[in-house]
Structures are given as C-alpha cells and as structure tokens.
Image: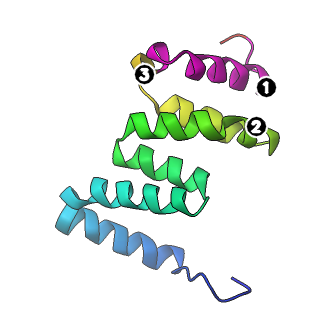
Amino acid sequence: DEERRWYRYHRLFADLLRQRLHREQGDLVPALHSRASKWYEQRGFIPEAVSHALEAGDDERAADLIEWTAWTTVMRGEVRTLRGWLDRLPSELERSRPQLGILYAWALALGGDLDS
C-alpha cells in the first residue's frame, strides 16, 4: 500500500502457494482460515473475517459476523457481497436464526430478485 504497511504477493505466485499448501498440508487449511478470520475481526476487517470464517467451514462464526456487519455492507452498496455470504450458509442455519432469514429477504429485495 501507499504507507508500505501491507504487502501482497503477485496473484499467480499466491495461487501457486495456496495450491502447494492444499496439496502438502491440506488438513491445516481450515485452521489457518479460522485464525485469519479472528485476526481480521480483531483489526476491524469484517468482510475479510466473514470470508475466512466461511472458508474455514465455521458457519456459526460466519453467521455471527454477517449479522453484525450486514447493514454496514448494504449501506456501502455491497448487496451482492451480502447475498454471496448468505448463499454459502446452510439453509438449516438460516431457518434457526431469524435475523439471517430477514437479512436474506432484504438482500433479495434490494438486489431486485423479488421472485425468489
């Protein structure tokens, strides 16, 4: 970044490293995503925390984060992002947590998908 506080590998190199990790130590991947989710949340990067919680398979944590950040996400005009997160959660979780159902209905309506 401009302040030289963040460093990012080239996308192709990062893809290579991810593939290698999955191939050689794939069983560690969920735990790494879980740790990344917590790290991002502690630093206020909630969208990234949600994504990593979903990748870790930690649906409850992802749902908690989604419920916490949903309206901020909508206000930023990122309804598709919210819908994408909600689509990745199991339907049983949505049924057991009414706020998720309400958020999903709003995401559909705001996204113009009134038929669903």
Q: Are marks 3 and 2 in contact (CB under 8 Å)?
A: no
Q: Is residue 74 magenta?
A: no
Label 2 sits on residue:
74
Please, what is the dominant secondary structure of the magenta stretch? helix
Q: Is residue 100 magenta?
A: yes
| Above/below status of 5 relative to 66 | below
| Nearest the eye: 24 or 60 | 60
Q: What's under tag 3, amino acid-wise? A: Leu
Q: Crowding at label 1, few (<14), some or many (≥20) Cα neighbours within 10 Å? A: some
Q: Is residue 41 left or right of residue 70?
A: left
Count of marks overlaid on the render: 3
Range covered by the magenta-colored residues: 94-114
Q: Crowding at label 2, few (<14), some or many (≥20) Cα neighbours within 10 Å? A: some
- Residue 5 lies, in percent from the top left, at 62, 85
Q: What's under tag 1, amino acid-wise? A: Leu
Q: Are marks 3 and 1 in contact (CB under 8 Å)?
A: no
* Residue depicted at 41% across the width and 25% down the height: 90
Name the residue furthest front: 42
* Real-space Cα separation, disc 3 to disc 1, in angstroms: 22 Å
* Real-space Cα separation, disc 2 to disc 1, in angstroms: 9 Å
Secondary structure state at the residue bearing disc 1: helix
Q: What's under tag 2, amino acid-wise? A: Val
Residue 104 visible in this rendered orientation of the protein: yes
- Residue 72 lies, in percent from the top left, at 74, 42
Using the image, tell me which numbered label, if any, was put on residue 93. 3
Label 1 sits on residue:
110
Q: Earlier in the sequence, mark 3 or mark 1?
A: 3
* Residue depicted at 46% across the width and 30% down the height: 89
Name the residue furthest top: 115
Q: Crowding at label 3, few (<14), some or many (≥20) Cα neighbours within 10 Å? A: some
Q: Are marks 2 and 1 in contact (CB under 8 Å)?
A: yes
